[in-house]
Image (cartoon, rainbow, N blue to C red):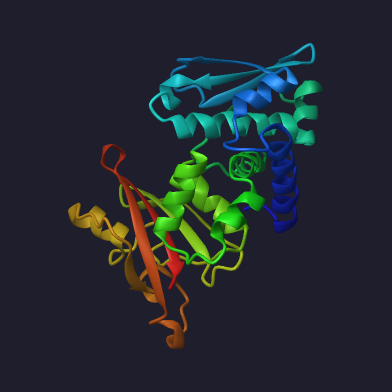
Amino acid sequence: MLLRKREIELSELAESIADYYCPDGIVDPEKIADSIGITYSYGDYGNAFDGLIEQEAGKFHIFINIKNNSSNHVRSRFTFAHELGHYFIDEHRHALLNGKTPSHPSFTNFSSKNPVELEADHFASSLLLPENRIKKDCIKKPFNFKLIETLSAKYQTSITATVLKLMTIDKHPIMLVCSVNGRIKWFKYSHDFPFKWLKKPAGITPKFTLAGTYFSNKEKFEEELPLTANEWFENVRDSEIERPFFEKCIYADKHSFVLSIIWEK
């Protein structure tokens, strides 16, 4: 997880770029690349990367892997924005120019623990979902999954990217948990989320959560449903065991994948 100060720096950088190059309407990564002279191409590069930025003689080129992005427009937009992050973030660009990083292959699956990739992910979500615009859209609106869907559709971003951006603007305490084959692959939470430790045994999706139910018997829940704090979280005080939360799951049967969005009622 990035430090809060760094998140703010990257958000402000990305938002200034979005406002300068795409002040109205949807933020277009291709338009930004064209404006600053970065060339780009789309191709099938197998499983080598989702996106890649290279530089030669001070010229930058972005590769977008259509194998991983072609069927998902919002994913390709995020991948492109992520690679732009490696250019606009000074430390990343200087490393490329100085040959410290000859190329920057990236996988935009939000599971990386590499600080450089985390920074580019944060930049990408802030570029595509500028904070000043998001805050206006959230005025006087309660937090629920419908709000996430509305923002995701408006800004052409994935549910995951949209929630990750909402985490940074203090709209509402939120946690995201990604589970694959009944095991937790990664989890992230807003700075103000009240619980930080998932239920033991560590790494196992808790049995009595919506995600756990899916892995037990493949039962899916289309709506957001209430749960209590002790179903997902460890070290819950007796006085907070019945503290009410909501869980909404996004399923991908092909990959035995569940994304749980958890927020306090």
Please determine whether, in this image, residue 238 is positioned above or below residue 53: below
Residue closer to the observer: 30 or 89: 30
Q: Which quarter of the figure has residue 16?
A: top right
Please determine whether, in this image, residue 161 is positioned above or below residue 205: above
Q: Is residue 185 left or right of residue 225?
A: right
Q: Is residue 181 left or right of residue 153?
A: left
Residue closer to the observer: 60 or 48: 60
Which residue is the extreme one toward the top? Answer: 57
Residue ID at (40%, 82%): 241
Q: Is residue 158 left or right of residue 256?
A: right
Q: Position of residue 96 (x, y in %)?
A: 75, 24
One can see residue 196 in this view: yes
Residue ID at (72%, 22%): 35
Which quadrant, please, contains the C terminus? bottom left
Q: Position of residue 166 (x, y in %)?
A: 55, 55
Q: Position of residue 31 (x, y in %)?
A: 64, 24
Residue ID at (28%, 67%): 208
Residue ID at (53%, 21%): 64
Please determine whether, in this image, residue 53 is positioned above or below residue 129: above
One can see residue 102 in this view: no
Please determine whether, in this image, residue 95 is positioned above or below residue 178: above
Q: Position of residue 124 (x, y in %)?
A: 61, 39
